[in-house]
Image (spheres, grey):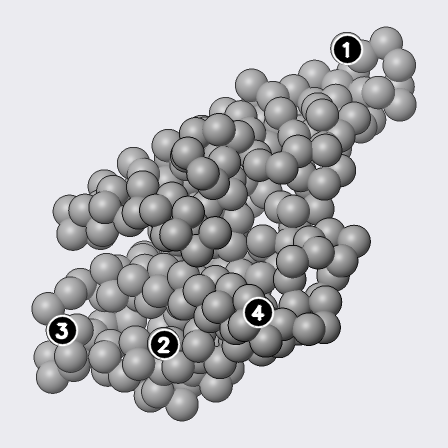
């Protein structure tokens, strides 16, 4: 199982590292592609769960949210875009003959678009990243590269720590109605590992490592919540994976689910530092 997870993760590691090295524009390209594929997957799951939607429009809105964050990363036009999407989806739902069917399609379309569009917060992290002091260990990186790397390593370290600890000593189940394999011991182990890694990254970026006492657990908890939220969606749809894009680990949504919730948390932390 661990070998399968590691190999499937390696499918995404090289493109992500290359994108970070090339710059924010390359990262934006990767995230746009993730929003496109993730949107198609989430609306397929919603349909299987019995929630009608407008998948093409919803996917386009998710991609638009990422594109808007790439073009205006420090702006507030994303909220306007969500409002426009809400209006247009509502207008499209009016064509449904059954008002109850139209109402569900309206809600599901906006939900799916905003849910996948949360990946745009990775670009918010990059845009709001505070400067890295010259004497810092990671001064060779740009602020955007350094802070996005912190997000990536924080999520991956939580996932790895939770899996390894849960597999070895996990006895008390966390949420059996959503994901029977998750344990409280794994949760605690993942939070500890994420906090240590986050502290090391903060220090390497010239920040106070003590900040990891807040950011580490918040990052870990949000990553776990993101994973469980996608598991809830898959369970409702009766699906094991979100798709078949990545051999051994399903679709793109299975790989970015934690980032959908962890991205906004790290963005908020970075914005607080910048403020």
- Say which residue label 3 marks: 139
- Of residues 134 and 22, the one nearer the viewer is 22
Quarter holding residue 274: bottom left
Residue ID at (48%, 35%): 251
* SS for callout 4: helix
Q: Picture coordinates of residue 245 (x, y %)? A: 43, 29
- Say which residue label 2 marks: 197
Circles 4, 3 touching at the beta carbon (< 8 Å): no
Circles 4, 2 touching at the beta carbon (< 8 Å): no
- Say which residue label 4 marks: 166
Lower position in the chain sequence, tag 3 or tag 1: 1
* SS for callout 1: loop
Label 4 and label 1: CA atoms lie apart by 49 Å
- Of residues 179 and 257, the one nearer the viewer is 179
- Of residues 75 and 172, the one nearer the viewer is 172
Quarter holding residue 26: top left
Lower position in the chain sequence, tag 3 or tag 2: 3
Lower position in the chain sequence, tag 2 or tag 1: 1
In this rendering, the answer to whether 87 lies above or below 181 is: above
Given this view, does label 3 or label 2 mark the residue nearer the observer? 2
| Relative to 129, 76 lies left or right | right
Residue 100 visible within the image: yes
Given this view, does label 4 or label 3 mark the residue nearer the observer? 4
Given this view, does label 4 or label 1 mark the residue nearer the observer? 4
| Mark 2 surroundings: few (<14), some (14-19) or many (≥20) residues within 10 A | many
- Say which residue label 1 marks: 95
* Quadrant of the rendering where the C terminus is positioned: bottom left
Lower position in the chain sequence, tag 4 or tag 3: 3
Label 4 and label 2: CA atoms lie apart by 18 Å
């Amino acid at each position: 199982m661990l070998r399968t997870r590691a190999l499937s993760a390696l499918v995404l590691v090289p493109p992500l590292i290359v994108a970070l090295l090339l710059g924010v524009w390359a990262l934006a390209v990767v995230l746009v592609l993730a929003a496109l594929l993730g949107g198609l997957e989430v609306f397929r799951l919603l349909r299987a769960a019995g929630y009608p939607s407008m998948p093409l429009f919803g996917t386009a809105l998710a991609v638009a949210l990422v594109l808007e964050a790439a073009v205006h990363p420090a702006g507030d036009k994303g909220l306007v875009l969500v409002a426009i999407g809400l209006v247009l989806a509502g207008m499209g739902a009016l064509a449904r003959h059954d008002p109850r069917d139209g109402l569900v399609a309206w809600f599901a379309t906006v939900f799916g678009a905003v849910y996948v569009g949360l990946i745009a917060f990775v670009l918010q992290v990059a845009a709001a990243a505070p400067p890295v002091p010259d004497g810092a260990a990671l001064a060779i990186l740009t602020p955007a590269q350094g802070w996005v790397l912190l997000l990536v390593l924080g999520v991956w370290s939580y996932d790895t720590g939770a899996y390894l600890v849960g597999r070895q000593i996990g006895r008390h189940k966390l949420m059996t109605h959503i994901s029977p394999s998750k344990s409280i011991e794994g949760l605690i182990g993942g939070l500890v590992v994420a906090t240590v890694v986050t502290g090391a990254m903060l220090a390497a970026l010239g920040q106070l490592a003590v900040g990891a006492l807040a950011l580490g657990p918040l990052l870990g908890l949000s990553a776990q919540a993101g994973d469980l939220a996608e598991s809830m969606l898959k369970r409702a749809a009766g699906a094991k994976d979100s798709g078949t894009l990545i051999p051994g680990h399903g679709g793109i949504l299975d790989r970015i689910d934690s980032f959908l919730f962890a991205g906004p948390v790290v963005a908020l932390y970075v914005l607080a530092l910048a403020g």
